[in-house]
Every structure is written in C-alpha cells, then in structure tokens.
Amino acid sequence: MKVHYLEIVTREVDAVCAAYASALNAQFGEPDARLGGARTAAAAGGGLVGVRSPLRESEDPVVRPYWLVADIDEALAAAVQAGGEIAHPPMQIPGHGTFAIYLQGGNDHGLWQL
C-alpha cells in the first residue's frame, strides 16, 4: 500500500504549510489550480502532500489519503462492495492522474491511479 497523495483541507493553509516547512523541512510550491488550489510538497518515497482551503463553505477540514491503485474502477467497486459510499466518482486531472473518493466508517478515503 502506498499513499500517492495526502490531501489536507484547512482554513489555515499558510500556517499549516509553515509548520510542515519548519518541522519537516518541507518545501511547498504555489497553489496548483488542477488540485483545487493546493500548495504541494514532495513526499518521501514519491507522491505529494497537498494543503488547500475548502472548495465550498460547507466543506469541513479533513486529512484524506489517496491510495495508489492500478485500476481505479476496480478498486472503487471493491470499496463499495465492502460497504463504502462513493462521494466523488473517478475524475481525471490532467498531468496528475485519476482520483476518486469514497466514505466509509465515518472517514473520507481516496484512490489514485496514474
């Protein structure tokens, strides 16, 4: 199992990025519109950490891992079969791959296919 993208949704983007920069020597870039305006930093072993503001007023802060999968449709179907509920169907982000989100056990879970 590998987390390809760790998404942190917060109302304090600059403060969270500054804390990670200070504590972990992470270097966050400028907002990436393709990732909802997230500022991203490279994660050890590949992948990204993205910190962004809520995209709508009703979006709560959340930390959501996106697990790297070979076949997103198959993985999402398996999650639904195990009781998950699709929150966002697979969507391609040019230059980044395809993601999906499902809800299960009171948590958000993400899948990512390159």
Image (cartoon, helix red, strand yellow):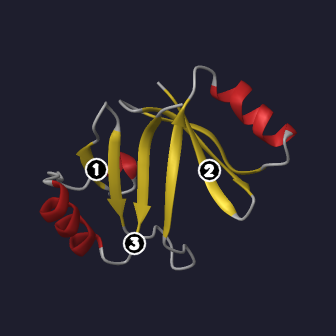
**Number of numbered markers:** 3
Q: Secondary structure at mark 2?
A: strand
Q: Secondary structure at mark 1?
A: loop
Which residue: 20% across, 69% down?
19
The image shows residue 44 at horizontal and vertical percentages of 27, 37
Alpha carbon distance from label 3 to label 1: 16 Å
Image vertical order of residue 35 relative to residue 98, above or below: below
Which residue: 34% across, 53% down?
50
Alpha carbon distance from label 2 to label 1: 21 Å
Q: Which residue is identified by label 1?
A: 32
- Disc 3 marks which amino acid? Thr
Q: Which residue is identified by label 3?
A: 10
Does 68 sit left or right of 46 as displayed? right
- Callout 1 environment at 10 Å: few (<14), some (14 to 19), or many (20+)? few
Q: Which residue is identified by label 2?
A: 109
Question: In the depicted view, which residue is nearer to us: 33 or 84?
Answer: 84
